[in-house]
Image: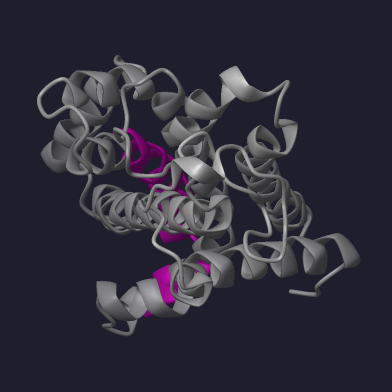
Amino acid sequence: MKLTTLHRIGWLLLAAIAVFAAFGPALTGTDPFAQDLRAFLQAPALAHPLGTDHLGRSMLARLADAAQLSLGLAALSVLSAAIPGTVLGILAAWYGGALEKVLLFISDSVLALPGLLLVLLLATLAPGEFWPLYLGLSLAFWVEYFRVVRASARTLFASPGVEASLLLGFGLGYIVRRHVWPELAPVVRTLASFGLAAAVLAMAALGFVGVGVKPPRPELGVMMTELLPYYQEAPWLIAAPVGLLATTLLALILIQHEEKNA
C-alpha cells in the first residue's frame, strides 16, 4: 500500500498522540491528582506548559494521563472486538448451516440495541469502573467485523483459487492464510480505524454526561465537563482536551480515507 501525503499526516499525528499517551505521564514528572489551590487557573508557563485547572492540578499531566486512558481502553476494546468478530465471521462463512444461523441471530440481537445504550446499561452495574466501558464497547463493535468478514469470506471461499486448494487437500488454515486473509486485511484495518475513532468519541461522550470514568481520574470527556464552567476565565484549559480529541479523530479520519481509497 502506497502512502500518500494525507496518509502520512494521519499516521504521524496518531503516532505522536500514542507516544504522548504512552510516555507523557512519566515525562511530565507531575502527579495528575496533586492539588495546589494556590495555583488556581494559572496560565501556561514553564512550570506548567498547559496551565493548571480549578484545583491547581497540572493540565499537561492530566491530559497525558487522560490520553493514556482513552487511547488504551479504545485500542483494547477494538482489539477485543476485531479478533473474535473476524474469526467468527470466517467460521460462519466456511461451515454455514446451524453455526451460521446461530451467529447471525446473536449478531442481530446485539444490533437491536444501540451501542451507546448497551454501554450505558452495563455502566449502571458498576458506575465509574473501567470494565463496563470496555465490555460494552467490545460487545457493540464485534458485530461489524463479523458481518463484514462473513459476507466477504463467503465470496472468497467460492473463488477458483480456494476450490483449487481444496482439490489439492489443503485445509481451512492454509486457505485463510493464502487466499482469504490477504483480501480481508485491508477491510479489517479500515473497520479497526473506524472503531478506534468511535470508541474514543464514545468514551468522551459518556464522560461528558457523567456516565463514564468518574473524577478525579482524568478522562477527556470528564475534563471537558469539569473545565466548562471556567471557559471564560481560562479558555486554554477547555481547549486542551477538545484539541486532543479533535486531533485524534482527525488522524483516524485521514487514515480511514486513505485505507478506503487504497
Quadrant of res 8: bottom right
Figure colour scheme: one colour
Q: Residue furthest right?
A: 5
User: In the visual, does 213 lie left or right of 185?
Assistant: left
Verify whether residue 158 appears in magenta.
yes
User: Magenta region, mostly helix, strand or loop?
Assistant: helix
Specify the quadrant that holds the C terminus. Answer: bottom right
> Horizontal and vertical percent for residue 168?
33, 85
User: In the visual, does 133 lie left or right of 203?
Assistant: left
Residue at 25% x, 51% y is: 88
> Horizontal and vertical percent for residue 236?
73, 38
Q: Nearer the viewer, residue 41 or 142?
A: 41
Q: Is residue 212 above or below residue 63?
A: above
Q: Residue furthest front?
A: 38
Decide if residue 168 is in sight here. yes
Q: Nearer the viewer, residue 37 or 72?
A: 37
Q: Which residues are magenta?
A: 140-165
> Horizontal and vertical percent for residue 103?
20, 36
Count numbered badges in the picture.
0
Q: Nearer the viewer, residue 74 or 109?
A: 74
Residue at 37% x, 71% y is: 176
Residue at 48% x, 52% y is: 62
Quadrant of res 237: top right
Specify the quadrant that holds the N terminus. Answer: bottom right
Q: Nearer the viewer, residue 101 or 70?
A: 70
Q: Is residue 119 above or below residue 191?
A: above
Decide if residue 108 is in sight here. no
User: In the visual, does 126 lie left or right of 32?
Assistant: left
> Horizontal and vertical percent for residue 245?
62, 42
Verify whether residue 112 appears in magenta.
no
